[in-house]
Image: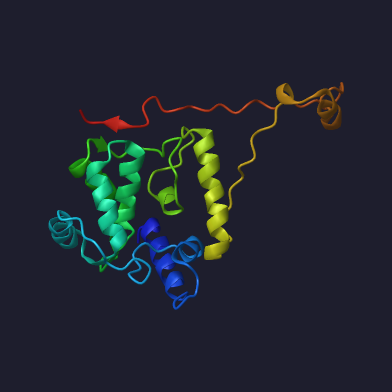
Amino acid sequence: MNRAYELYLEQIEEHQTSHPSSLAVDVLQAYHPDLSCTICYPIANLYRPFRRFWSTYRDNYFATTYSQKTNDAYQVLVTATDYNTVRAAARDIVFSCRYNNDLLDPKEIIAGLLLEHTSYTLAPTLPLDFEATLLDLHIEDLLPSTPFQTRLRTENLLFDFQNQLGRADLNFDTSPPRSIYTLGPEQLADTGAGSSTDTYIPIPQRLDFPSSPISEIP
């Protein structure tokens, strides 16, 4: 089973145990996210073209239910013009539906939604300023070429969700490499970098930034 989809099913199961709840929806969703929950997001107002979209989407991916979040995300997908917004909307469409399909591949669906409904194709890595969720980290690859700030922010998201999902195996070392070139005199003395014996000079980490993180179809 796809890892992103597996995590999504775990989120649904954990969220269901929180109902009934006296917490506000925003608070409950912050602790136990599940955009597919129709208790939190009951159908209220449907965007007119959504019905046709849902008919096709349901048949293509064996979807069984959707929430108001699905409708809202679809409207954003077909009206927004910047990559980050449509990429997030495509993700929210996928993870606000429930499926009868153990072979579901969220990355494939998101790529297809972007290709069909926007002028973009799915970027190989997460953009620097993209607001990622835990599920995003299992869709685009976090390659060494991913900008360091994005990797640091999204890896920190794992720590936030780790407590919620109880996953002790999600461990990352996000501490930046230390170099004597960025240390003050006192720090150099503490590390022994100024001594004549056993002096170690760390090599600064090289970061390769992608030349074009977003591919746009004219």
Name the spot of residue 89 as percent of width and height, x first.
Answer: 31, 48
Depth check, front residue: 179 or 92: 92
User: Is residue 120 among what the camera can see?
Assistant: yes
Rendered-image quadrant of the N terminus: bottom left
Question: Would you place residue 136 above or below residue 195 in this image?
Answer: below
The number of callouts visible is 0
Name the spot of residue 116 as percent of width and height, x first.
Answer: 18, 43
User: Is residue 167 among what the camera can see?
Assistant: no
Determine the residue positioned at 42% across, 74% down. 16
Determine the residue positioned at 41% across, 39% down. 126
Q: How is the image coloured?
A: rainbow
The answer to which image quadrant residue 55 occupies is: bottom left
* Residue 158 placement, left or right of 45: right
Q: Can you name the residue that lies furthest to the front here?
A: 45
* Residue 69 placement, left or right of 50: right
Q: Can you name the residue that lies furthest to the bottom here?
A: 20
Determine the residue positioned at 35% across, 47% down. 88
* Residue 25 placement, left or right of 78: right
The answer to which image quadrant residue 203 occupies is: top right
Name the spot of residue 165 as percent of width and height, x first.
Answer: 52, 64
Rendered-image quadrant of the C terminus: top left
Depth check, front residue: 16 or 184: 16
Name the spot of residue 215 as percent of width and height, x first.
Answer: 29, 31
The answer to which image quadrant residue 129 occupies is: top left
Question: Would you place residue 74 above or below residue 168 in this image?
Answer: above
